[in-house]
Amino acid sequence: MKQLSAFLTAAAIGVMTVTAQAQVKLPAPSPAQTIKQDFALSSVEVSYSRPAMKGRTIMGDLVPYGKIWRMGANAATRVKFGEDVKLNGKPVPAGEYVLYAIPNRNSWEIIVNKGLKNWGIDGYNQADDVARFTADVTEMPFPIESFMITFGDVAPSSMTMMILWDRTMVPIQVTADIDGKIMASIEEGMKSDKKPYFQAAMYYFESGRDVSQAIKWMDQALAEPANAKAFWMFYQKARMQAKAGDKSGAKATAAKSTELAKAANNADYVALNEKLIATL
């Protein structure tokens, strides 16, 4: 009876030990990351896991050449596009997908696939591919320890998605055709009671359209009582006048913007106006 009691006590201690060990939380060896970039008229979001080099040889070894790779660790890397885009010129409709790659020494084949239920490459079906394209490899001057996907050169309708690990960087050009949507929105907005004068003026100016029309709309925006002290809007009008070749008008408008910016204690716009005036 004493032996049985001792056995049960030891067993209970063992269960408690195992339970305690099961509750120990350790850092993930390949931490998950979600990165979201506002882009065009929506956003692009990537969710992936980040394995580290840890002294290992990466390209051509841990990541074999010529074989499909999950582009990270653990579950397949996911990407969500808020609107239709093109990746290196290949159309990809708005939606959520998984990303795969077939790495090679000088270029990678990038695969956009519908297999959202896939674990890594398990379950991959080529019939679910939405797009395939080639992306050139750029050699980095220094190693990147943890696998990384990030965005650079972000412009209104284009940016670069960059895949980096070890000394390898693979850039993917992301573009969106938003001009038609914006022009239609401006046209529709001008039919409303509250017309988008400022937004329309800025888009015409930034997209290289009729600068005289941009100035006209900016004047209408500035005529609204709520914008009487909008130094940032006067600064943009000065830029437009400078582009139109009206240097004296640009100087006067920039001086007005400077005066308002000083009254608002905004040193940034004071400096911007001073730099603009110096170029005229």
Image (tube, helix red, strand yellow):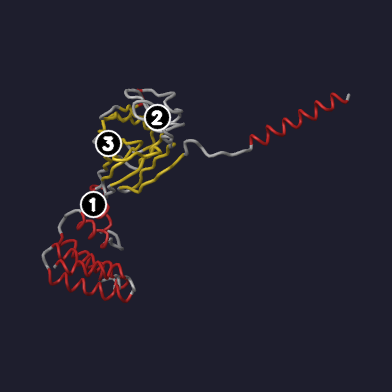
Residues 79 and 135: in front is: 135
| Mark 2 Cα shell of 10 Å, populated few (<14), some (14-19), many (≥20) | many
Question: Which residue is the site of mark 1?
Answer: 183
| Mark 3 Cα shell of 10 Å, populated few (<14), some (14-19), many (≥20) | some
> Is 96 positioned to the left or the right of 252 in the image?
right
Q: Counting residues from the N terminus, which is met first, the one under dot 1 or under dot 3? A: 3
- Residue 247, compared with residue 196, is above or below; it is below
Marks 1 and 3, how far apart in space? 40 Å
Question: Which residue is the site of mark 2?
Answer: 70
> Is 33 positioned to the left or the right of 103 in the image?
right
**Which of label 1 and label 3 is nearer to you?**
3
Q: Secondary structure at mark 1?
A: helix
Which mark identifies residue 165? none
Could you tell me residue 48's position as x and y percent?
42, 37
Residues 93 and 240: in front is: 240
Residues 222 and 51: in front is: 51
Q: Amino acid at mark 1?
A: Met
Q: Secondary structure at mark 3?
A: strand
| Mark 1 Cα shell of 10 Å, populated few (<14), some (14-19), many (≥20) | some
Which mark identifies residue 139? 3
- Residue 207, compared with residue 240, is above or below; it is above
Could you tell me residue 32's position as x and y percent?
46, 39
Q: Counting residues from the N terminus, which is met first, the one under dot 3 or under dot 2? A: 2
Residues 256 and 7: in front is: 7
- Residue 257, compared with residue 217, is above or below; it is below
Could you tell me residue 182's position as x and y percent?
26, 51
